[in-house]
Image (cartoon, helix red, strand yellow):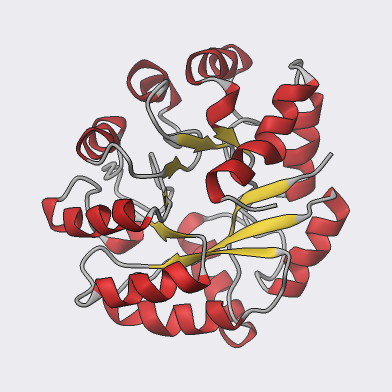
Amino acid sequence: MDIIDAHNHIWPEKVACKARNYLEKIFNYKMMALPVADNLLAYMDKAGISKSVISSVASHTEQVIPINNWLFSLKEERFVLFASMHPFLEGFKEELKRIKDNASGIKLQPEFQNFYVDDERAFALYEELEKFRIPVLFHCGAELSSTGEIRSSPERIIKILEKFSELKVIGAHMGGFLIWKEVLEKLAGKNLYFDTSDSIRVMKRELLDKLFNKHTFDKIVYGSDFPFGNPEKEVDFIKSLNISEENKRKILSFNIKSLLNIS
């Protein structure tokens, strides 16, 4: 069975140790391994993963271009690139042209980037993403490092979906980390994809089944969130689910292939 992991993070080797130490401290969570390309490839091999989406986040506007320069320099054919972007970057249209030529999507992280997903100042970016048909992966739901305020709540995501009906959206963490009951009530069934990262192995099975039924297997993609999640354990869990083999294939590869138009 072909497997594509839709949610991963790595850093350049020269800053990977610093990134790991900082993130482990603020999350109070131990990474699987040093977040560099070779370690991710090793975990992919263990899990039988053919391709992995690499997502990069710029906490500040001045980081966008340097991060993307590094990301675009990666020549590993098993990596699918989701570039860095900041909602308040001046000249973002020029950078989107580079992204269109070099990557398959972008990642936005409202907590680290200090914005609300429905902030009207970000609408110009969403409009261009919609026009260029560039998918966006949003961190959705709570954040372990935050004060508890949720900048990407289902209500806020719905506002984006309603205003930008052709925008291709992936809501990480089954649409809302730690707020899955609210996701089930308000966001499930809407026009976006959910990725499974940090979620399906810890959710109550009854709630997971309800989300599967309401959102449908056509809109769910597998993601491990390496180096925070273990790709092999996440794959094994999906394979163990009491669902059809067809639906397992949809989650593990077919849906993300269709969304990103990759083989």
Question: In this view of the protein, can residue 196 be seen by the observer?
Answer: yes
Question: In this view of the protein, can residue 110 be seen by the observer?
Answer: no
User: Residue 152 at x, y = what percent?
Assistant: 30, 42
Q: Is residue 89 above or below residue 259?
A: below
- Residue 200 falls left or right of residue 115: right
Q: Residue at x 54, y 77 (%)?
A: 71
Q: Residue at x 47, y 72 (%)?
A: 101
Q: Is residue 49 above or below residue 154?
A: below
Q: Nearer the viewer, residue 37 or 141?
A: 37
Q: Nearer the viewer, residue 228 or 187?
A: 187
> Residue pushed farthest left?
120
Q: Residue at x 50, y 35 (%)?
A: 194
User: Residue 95 at x, y = what percent?
Assistant: 34, 76
Q: Nearer the viewer, residue 75 or 173?
A: 75
Q: Quadrant of residue 93?
A: bottom left
* Number of numbered discs visible in the structure rendering: 0
Q: Nearer the viewer, residue 18 or 126?
A: 126
User: Residue 121 at x, y = what percent?
Assistant: 13, 58
Q: Quadrant of residue 94?
A: bottom left
> Residue pushed farthest bottom?
14
Q: Residue at x 84, y 39 (%)?
A: 1
User: Residue 41 at x, y = what percent?
Assistant: 78, 65
